[in-house]
Protein backbone atom coordinates (compact mmCIF):
# COMPACT_ATOMS: atom_id res chain seq x y z
CA UNK A 1 0.00 0.00 0.00
CA UNK A 2 2.85 2.31 0.90
CA UNK A 3 4.49 1.51 -2.47
CA UNK A 4 1.30 2.50 -4.35
CA UNK A 5 1.22 5.89 -2.59
CA UNK A 6 4.82 6.58 -3.57
CA UNK A 7 4.12 5.66 -7.19
CA UNK A 8 1.09 7.94 -7.37
CA UNK A 9 3.04 10.86 -5.89
CA UNK A 10 5.84 10.30 -8.36
CA UNK A 11 3.41 10.34 -11.27
CA UNK A 12 1.72 13.51 -10.06
CA UNK A 13 5.09 15.21 -9.65
CA UNK A 14 6.19 14.24 -13.14
CA UNK A 15 2.91 15.53 -14.65
CA UNK A 16 3.27 18.86 -12.82
CA UNK A 17 6.78 19.22 -14.19
CA UNK A 18 5.62 18.58 -17.76
CA UNK A 19 2.82 21.14 -17.51
CA UNK A 20 5.19 23.70 -16.04
CA UNK A 21 7.70 23.16 -18.83
CA UNK A 22 4.93 23.33 -21.41
CA UNK A 23 3.82 26.70 -20.10
CA UNK A 24 7.37 28.03 -20.23
CA UNK A 25 7.68 26.97 -23.86
CA UNK A 26 4.46 28.77 -24.98
CA UNK A 27 5.04 32.53 -24.53
CA UNK A 28 2.41 35.12 -25.58
CA UNK A 29 2.22 35.71 -29.38
CA UNK A 30 4.35 38.61 -30.64
CA UNK A 31 2.47 41.21 -32.68
CA UNK A 32 3.87 42.26 -36.06
CA UNK A 33 4.43 45.76 -34.66
CA UNK A 34 6.58 44.60 -31.75
CA UNK A 35 8.48 42.24 -34.02
CA UNK A 36 9.44 45.17 -36.24
CA UNK A 37 9.79 47.94 -33.66
CA UNK A 38 11.62 47.55 -30.38
CA UNK A 39 11.26 50.77 -28.37
CA UNK A 40 14.07 49.76 -26.07
CA UNK A 41 16.51 48.86 -28.81
CA UNK A 42 19.32 51.24 -29.73
CA UNK A 43 19.71 52.45 -33.32
CA UNK A 44 21.76 50.37 -35.71
CA UNK A 45 25.05 51.66 -37.07
CA UNK A 46 23.21 53.15 -40.07
CA UNK A 47 20.78 55.00 -37.79
CA UNK A 48 17.81 52.74 -38.49
CA UNK A 49 15.40 51.68 -35.75
CA UNK A 50 13.00 49.64 -37.90
CA UNK A 51 13.64 46.02 -38.82
CA UNK A 52 12.97 46.30 -42.57
CA UNK A 53 15.05 45.99 -45.69
CA UNK A 54 16.38 49.07 -47.47
CA UNK A 55 14.49 49.98 -50.66
CA UNK A 56 16.39 49.76 -53.94
CA UNK A 57 16.07 52.65 -56.42
CA UNK A 58 14.39 51.57 -59.66
CA UNK A 59 13.97 54.87 -61.57
CA UNK A 60 15.32 57.31 -62.35
CA UNK A 61 18.84 55.87 -61.98
CA UNK A 62 22.18 56.03 -63.80
CA UNK A 63 21.75 59.73 -64.71
CA UNK A 64 18.43 59.17 -66.48
CA UNK A 65 16.49 62.33 -67.35
CA UNK A 66 12.71 61.87 -67.16
CA UNK A 67 10.21 63.92 -69.15
CA UNK A 68 7.47 65.92 -67.50
CA UNK A 69 6.87 65.27 -63.83
CA UNK A 70 9.54 63.63 -61.66
CA UNK A 71 8.38 60.26 -60.27
CA UNK A 72 10.74 58.36 -57.94
CA UNK A 73 10.26 54.58 -57.92
CA UNK A 74 11.93 52.10 -55.55
CA UNK A 75 11.39 48.54 -54.39
CA UNK A 76 9.30 48.21 -51.26
CA UNK A 77 10.85 47.91 -47.80
CA UNK A 78 10.05 44.47 -46.35
CA UNK A 79 9.77 43.56 -42.66
CA UNK A 80 12.56 41.21 -41.63
CA UNK A 81 10.46 39.33 -39.06
CA UNK A 82 6.87 40.33 -39.84
CA UNK A 83 4.76 41.84 -42.61
CA UNK A 84 3.92 45.46 -41.67
CA UNK A 85 2.29 48.39 -43.55
CA UNK A 86 5.37 50.49 -44.25
CA UNK A 87 5.20 54.19 -45.15
CA UNK A 88 8.09 55.92 -46.90
CA UNK A 89 10.30 58.97 -46.93
CA UNK A 90 12.03 60.28 -50.08
CA UNK A 91 14.84 62.82 -50.26
CA UNK A 92 16.44 64.64 -53.20
CA UNK A 93 19.88 66.31 -53.19
CA UNK A 94 21.47 68.75 -55.63
CA UNK A 95 24.96 68.53 -57.14
CA UNK A 96 26.42 70.11 -53.97
CA UNK A 97 24.82 67.33 -51.90
CA UNK A 98 22.41 69.78 -50.30
CA UNK A 99 18.98 68.37 -49.57
CA UNK A 100 16.54 70.29 -51.77
CA UNK A 101 13.42 68.18 -51.28
CA UNK A 102 11.91 65.84 -48.71
CA UNK A 103 8.56 64.12 -49.04
CA UNK A 104 7.98 63.75 -45.32
CA UNK A 105 6.30 60.50 -44.34
CA UNK A 106 4.07 59.38 -47.19
CA UNK A 107 2.17 56.23 -48.01
CA UNK A 108 3.73 56.08 -51.44
CA UNK A 109 1.78 55.04 -54.52
CA UNK A 110 1.72 51.41 -55.59
CA UNK A 111 3.82 50.80 -58.68
CA UNK A 112 3.44 47.10 -59.16
CA UNK A 113 3.46 44.44 -56.45
CA UNK A 114 7.09 45.03 -55.51
CA UNK A 115 7.58 48.77 -56.09
CA UNK A 116 6.49 52.03 -54.52
CA UNK A 117 6.57 55.46 -56.21
CA UNK A 118 6.38 59.12 -55.22
CA UNK A 119 5.82 62.19 -57.41
CA UNK A 120 8.09 65.07 -56.39
CA UNK A 121 5.87 68.05 -55.72
CA UNK A 122 8.56 70.63 -55.00
CA UNK A 123 10.29 73.00 -57.39
CA UNK A 124 13.67 71.70 -58.52
CA UNK A 125 16.09 73.43 -60.84
CA UNK A 126 15.56 72.19 -64.39
CA UNK A 127 18.13 70.16 -66.34
CA UNK A 128 20.60 69.72 -63.45
CA UNK A 129 22.25 66.66 -61.83
CA UNK A 130 20.61 65.40 -58.63
CA UNK A 131 20.51 62.29 -56.45
CA UNK A 132 17.72 60.70 -54.44
CA UNK A 133 17.13 58.03 -51.82
CA UNK A 134 14.26 56.44 -49.88
CA UNK A 135 13.59 54.55 -46.64
CA UNK A 136 10.75 52.78 -44.87
CA UNK A 137 8.97 54.33 -41.88
CA UNK A 138 6.57 52.71 -39.37
CA UNK A 139 5.17 54.07 -36.10
CA UNK A 140 7.95 56.63 -35.78
CA UNK A 141 10.73 54.10 -36.38
CA UNK A 142 12.85 54.41 -39.53
CA UNK A 143 14.46 51.78 -41.69
CA UNK A 144 17.82 52.00 -43.45
CA UNK A 145 18.19 54.41 -46.37
CA UNK A 146 18.49 53.03 -49.86
CA UNK A 147 21.62 53.68 -51.83
CA UNK A 148 21.55 57.03 -53.64
CA UNK A 149 20.59 57.11 -57.32
CA UNK A 150 21.77 59.73 -59.76
CA UNK A 151 19.48 61.45 -62.26
CA UNK A 152 19.04 64.69 -64.15
CA UNK A 153 15.92 66.81 -63.61
CA UNK A 154 13.59 67.25 -66.61
CA UNK A 155 14.83 69.69 -69.23
CA UNK A 156 11.74 71.81 -68.80
CA UNK A 157 9.60 71.30 -71.86
CA UNK A 158 8.84 69.33 -74.99
CA UNK A 159 6.45 68.89 -77.90
CA UNK A 160 6.10 65.21 -78.73
CA UNK A 161 3.40 63.70 -80.91
CA UNK A 162 0.07 64.98 -79.62
CA UNK A 163 1.49 66.26 -76.32
CA UNK A 164 2.93 69.56 -75.05
CA UNK A 165 4.71 70.08 -71.72
CA UNK A 166 5.97 73.65 -71.22
CA UNK A 167 6.61 75.01 -67.70
CA UNK A 168 7.65 78.49 -68.98
CA UNK A 169 8.80 79.47 -65.46
CA UNK A 170 12.29 78.29 -66.40
CA UNK A 171 12.77 81.22 -68.78
CA UNK A 172 12.28 79.38 -72.05
CA UNK A 173 9.54 77.86 -74.19
CA UNK A 174 9.23 75.00 -76.64
CA UNK A 175 6.68 77.11 -78.52
CA UNK A 176 7.27 80.16 -80.71
CA UNK A 177 6.81 83.60 -79.11
CA UNK A 178 5.19 86.07 -81.52
CA UNK A 179 5.05 89.82 -80.95
CA UNK A 180 6.19 91.58 -77.76
CA UNK A 181 6.68 89.03 -74.97
CA UNK A 182 9.01 88.75 -72.01
CA UNK A 183 9.92 86.12 -69.45
CA UNK A 184 9.25 87.13 -65.86
CA UNK A 185 11.84 85.47 -63.61
CA UNK A 186 10.45 82.43 -61.83
CA UNK A 187 6.90 83.16 -63.01
CA UNK A 188 6.41 82.56 -66.72
CA UNK A 189 5.99 84.41 -70.00
CA UNK A 190 4.10 87.70 -70.27
CA UNK A 191 2.15 88.80 -73.33
CA UNK A 192 2.71 92.55 -73.65
CA UNK A 193 0.25 93.46 -76.42
CA UNK A 194 -2.97 92.24 -78.04
CA UNK A 195 -1.04 90.72 -80.94
CA UNK A 196 1.47 88.92 -78.67
CA UNK A 197 1.16 85.16 -78.23
CA UNK A 198 3.01 81.85 -77.93
CA UNK A 199 2.26 79.39 -80.72
CA UNK A 200 2.71 75.61 -80.70
CA UNK A 201 2.38 73.41 -83.78
CA UNK A 202 1.62 69.83 -82.78
CA UNK A 203 3.13 67.02 -84.89
CA UNK A 204 -0.04 64.97 -84.36
CA UNK A 205 -3.68 65.95 -83.89
CA UNK A 206 -5.06 65.56 -80.39
CA UNK A 207 -8.58 64.29 -81.08
CA UNK A 208 -9.46 63.85 -77.39
CA UNK A 209 -7.70 65.38 -74.41
CA UNK A 210 -7.14 68.59 -72.51
CA UNK A 211 -5.40 71.94 -72.73
CA UNK A 212 -4.63 73.38 -69.28
CA UNK A 213 -2.49 76.30 -68.12
CA UNK A 214 -1.92 78.66 -65.19
CA UNK A 215 -2.53 82.38 -65.82
CA UNK A 216 -2.11 85.54 -63.72
CA UNK A 217 -2.10 89.29 -64.38
CA UNK A 218 -5.73 89.41 -65.53
CA UNK A 219 -8.88 91.00 -64.11
CA UNK A 220 -12.02 92.79 -65.23
CA UNK A 221 -9.99 95.91 -65.99
CA UNK A 222 -7.65 94.21 -68.44
CA UNK A 223 -7.61 95.92 -71.85
CA UNK A 224 -9.60 94.21 -74.57
CA UNK A 225 -13.08 93.18 -75.66
CA UNK A 226 -13.68 89.48 -76.49
CA UNK A 227 -10.15 88.64 -75.33
CA UNK A 228 -8.75 85.10 -75.47
CA UNK A 229 -6.95 83.13 -72.78
CA UNK A 230 -5.99 80.46 -75.33
CA UNK A 231 -6.98 79.29 -78.78
CA UNK A 232 -6.79 76.10 -80.82
CA UNK A 233 -7.38 75.93 -84.55
CA UNK A 234 -6.58 74.18 -87.79
CA UNK A 235 -3.58 75.79 -89.44
CA UNK A 236 -2.98 79.53 -89.42
CA UNK A 237 -6.03 81.20 -90.95
CA UNK A 238 -8.38 83.62 -89.24
CA UNK A 239 -9.22 81.86 -85.94
CA UNK A 240 -12.65 83.51 -85.77
CA UNK A 241 -14.02 81.56 -88.72
CA UNK A 242 -11.75 78.53 -88.48
CA UNK A 243 -13.50 75.19 -88.97
CA UNK A 244 -11.81 73.84 -85.83
CA UNK A 245 -11.84 76.93 -83.66
CA UNK A 246 -11.71 76.32 -79.92
CA UNK A 247 -11.37 79.58 -77.99
CA UNK A 248 -11.53 80.17 -74.24
CA UNK A 249 -12.30 83.80 -73.40
CA UNK A 250 -11.94 86.21 -70.48
CA UNK A 251 -13.55 89.38 -71.75
CA UNK A 252 -11.95 92.77 -71.16
CA UNK A 253 -12.98 96.21 -69.99
CA UNK A 254 -14.38 97.18 -73.42
CA UNK A 255 -16.98 94.39 -73.25
CA UNK A 256 -20.44 95.04 -71.82
CA UNK A 257 -19.70 92.62 -68.92
CA UNK A 258 -15.98 92.96 -68.13
CA UNK A 259 -14.50 89.71 -66.81
CA UNK A 260 -17.15 87.51 -68.43
CA UNK A 261 -15.94 83.99 -69.20
CA UNK A 262 -17.17 81.87 -72.11
CA UNK A 263 -15.89 79.58 -74.87
CA UNK A 264 -16.63 78.42 -78.40
CA UNK A 265 -15.82 75.15 -80.12
CA UNK A 266 -16.43 74.45 -83.82
CA UNK A 267 -16.30 70.83 -84.93
CA UNK A 268 -15.46 70.78 -88.59
CA UNK A 269 -17.64 73.38 -90.33
CA UNK A 270 -17.79 77.04 -89.33
CA UNK A 271 -20.66 77.58 -91.80
CA UNK A 272 -22.88 74.97 -90.11
CA UNK A 273 -24.70 76.25 -87.05
CA UNK A 274 -24.97 72.69 -85.79
CA UNK A 275 -21.17 72.51 -85.59
CA UNK A 276 -20.86 75.67 -83.47
CA UNK A 277 -20.92 75.02 -79.73
CA UNK A 278 -20.95 77.90 -77.24
CA UNK A 279 -20.32 77.57 -73.54
CA UNK A 280 -22.19 79.35 -70.79
CA UNK A 281 -21.25 83.06 -70.49
CA UNK A 282 -21.15 84.72 -67.06
CA UNK A 283 -19.28 87.44 -65.21
CA UNK A 284 -16.44 86.30 -62.96
CA UNK A 285 -14.43 88.37 -60.47
CA UNK A 286 -10.65 88.11 -60.94
CA UNK A 287 -7.60 89.55 -59.20
CA UNK A 288 -4.53 90.36 -61.28
CA UNK A 289 -2.34 89.23 -58.36
CA UNK A 290 -3.78 85.72 -58.23
CA UNK A 291 -3.01 82.65 -60.33
CA UNK A 292 -5.89 80.91 -62.09
CA UNK A 293 -6.04 77.40 -63.55
CA UNK A 294 -7.78 77.25 -66.96
CA UNK A 295 -8.68 73.89 -68.49
CA UNK A 296 -10.48 72.88 -71.68
CA UNK A 297 -11.37 69.22 -72.23
CA UNK A 298 -12.87 67.58 -75.28
CA UNK A 299 -13.81 64.23 -76.73
CA UNK A 300 -16.14 63.09 -79.47
CA UNK A 301 -19.55 64.54 -78.65
CA UNK A 302 -18.52 66.53 -75.56
CA UNK A 303 -16.50 69.59 -74.47
CA UNK A 304 -16.03 71.46 -71.20
CA UNK A 305 -14.15 74.40 -69.71
CA UNK A 306 -13.37 75.09 -66.06
CA UNK A 307 -11.52 77.81 -64.17
CA UNK A 308 -10.12 77.39 -60.65
CA UNK A 309 -8.41 79.69 -58.20
CA UNK A 310 -4.74 79.07 -57.35
CA UNK A 311 -4.25 75.75 -59.13
CA UNK A 312 -5.73 72.45 -60.35
CA UNK A 313 -7.18 71.70 -56.92
CA UNK A 314 -8.44 75.19 -56.13
CA UNK A 315 -11.99 76.48 -55.82
CA UNK A 316 -13.99 76.27 -59.04
CA UNK A 317 -15.15 79.73 -60.18
CA UNK A 318 -16.38 78.75 -63.64
CA UNK A 319 -17.55 75.46 -65.12
CA UNK A 320 -19.43 74.83 -68.35
CA UNK A 321 -19.88 71.67 -70.40
CA UNK A 322 -21.78 70.93 -73.56
CA UNK A 323 -22.59 68.02 -75.82
CA UNK A 324 -21.47 68.60 -79.39
CA UNK A 325 -22.77 67.29 -82.70
CA UNK A 326 -20.73 64.10 -82.55
CA UNK A 327 -18.22 65.21 -85.16
CA UNK A 328 -14.66 64.53 -83.91
CA UNK A 329 -12.36 67.45 -83.20
CA UNK A 330 -9.50 66.80 -85.62
CA UNK A 331 -7.67 69.94 -86.83
CA UNK A 332 -4.74 69.21 -89.14
CA UNK A 333 -2.33 70.71 -88.46
CA UNK A 334 -3.33 71.18 -84.84
CA UNK A 335 -2.16 74.64 -83.74
CA UNK A 336 -2.33 75.98 -80.17
CA UNK A 337 -1.89 79.60 -79.05
CA UNK A 338 -1.51 81.17 -75.64
CA UNK A 339 -3.63 84.20 -76.40
CA UNK A 340 -4.71 84.50 -80.03
CA UNK A 341 -3.58 86.06 -83.30
CA UNK A 342 -5.74 89.06 -84.30
CA UNK A 343 -8.65 87.92 -86.45
CA UNK A 344 -11.76 89.41 -87.97
CA UNK A 345 -12.71 91.11 -84.68
CA UNK A 346 -9.46 93.08 -84.49
CA UNK A 347 -6.71 93.27 -81.85
CA UNK A 348 -9.04 93.75 -78.86
CA UNK A 349 -10.50 90.29 -79.51
CA UNK A 350 -7.04 88.71 -79.44
CA UNK A 351 -4.59 88.36 -76.51
CA UNK A 352 -4.68 90.06 -73.09
CA UNK A 353 -1.79 92.48 -72.50
CA UNK A 354 -0.20 91.79 -69.11
CA UNK A 355 -1.30 88.15 -68.90
CA UNK A 356 1.45 85.84 -67.58
CA UNK A 357 1.36 82.12 -68.41
CA UNK A 358 3.06 79.05 -66.96
CA UNK A 359 2.67 75.26 -66.82
CA UNK A 360 1.16 74.48 -70.20
CA UNK A 361 -0.15 70.94 -70.67
CA UNK A 362 -1.80 69.55 -73.82
CA UNK A 363 -2.35 65.82 -73.86
CA UNK A 364 -4.69 62.85 -73.71
CA UNK A 365 -2.88 61.84 -70.50
CA UNK A 366 -3.69 63.25 -67.03
CA UNK A 367 -1.97 66.52 -66.16
CA UNK A 368 1.31 65.92 -64.26
CA UNK A 369 2.43 67.76 -61.13
CA UNK A 370 4.33 70.82 -62.33
CA UNK A 371 7.13 72.20 -60.12
CA UNK A 372 5.76 74.60 -57.55
CA UNK A 373 2.12 73.90 -58.42
Image (cartoon, rainbow, N blue to C red):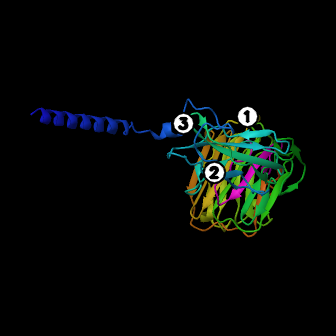
How crowded pointer 3 is (Cα within 10 Å; few <14, some 14-19, many 20+) is rated as some
- The location of residue 294, given as percent across then percent down, is 68, 47
In the image, residue 366 lies in the stretch drawn in magenta: yes
The front one of 161 and 331 is 161
Task: Say which element carries label 3.
Answer: loop
As drawn, 316 above or below 299? above
Q: Nearer the viewer, mark 3 or mark 1?
A: 3
The answer to whether residue 35 of the structure is visible from this angle is yes
Report the residue marked by disc 1.
Answer: 287
Contact? badges 2 and 3 (CB < 8 Å): no
Give the mark nearer the N terminus: 3 vs 1.
Answer: 3
Q: Quadrant of the C terminus?
A: top right
- The location of residue 112, given as percent across then percent down, is 57, 57
Task: Say which element carries label 2.
Answer: strand
As drawn, 194 above or below 240? above
- The location of residue 242, given as percent across then percent down, is 73, 64
C-alpha span from label 2 to label 1: 37 Å
Report the residue marked by disc 3.
Answer: 37
Which residues, given as a range, are shown in magenta? Answer: 348-372
The front one of 117 and 142 is 142
The front one of 3 and 367 is 3
Mark sitting on residue 117: 2
As drawn, 221 above or below 54? above
Q: Nearer the viewer, mark 2 or mark 3?
A: 3
Q: Quadrant of the N terminus?
A: top left
Q: Main secondary structure of the magenta part?
A: loop
- The location of residue 285, given as percent across then percent down, is 68, 35
The front one of 42 and 69 is 42
Amino acid sequence: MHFKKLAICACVGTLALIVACGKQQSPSPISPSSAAVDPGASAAADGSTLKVTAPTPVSPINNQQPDGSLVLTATKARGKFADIPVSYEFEVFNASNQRVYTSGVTGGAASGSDNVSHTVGGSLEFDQPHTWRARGVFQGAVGPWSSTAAFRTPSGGYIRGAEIFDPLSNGRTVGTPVGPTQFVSGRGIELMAHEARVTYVMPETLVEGELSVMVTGIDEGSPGDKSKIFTMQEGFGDPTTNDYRFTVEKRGRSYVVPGAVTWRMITGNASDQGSINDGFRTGVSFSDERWYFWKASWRNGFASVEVREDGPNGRVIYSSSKTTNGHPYRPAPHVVHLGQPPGRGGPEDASIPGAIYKNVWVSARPRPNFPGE
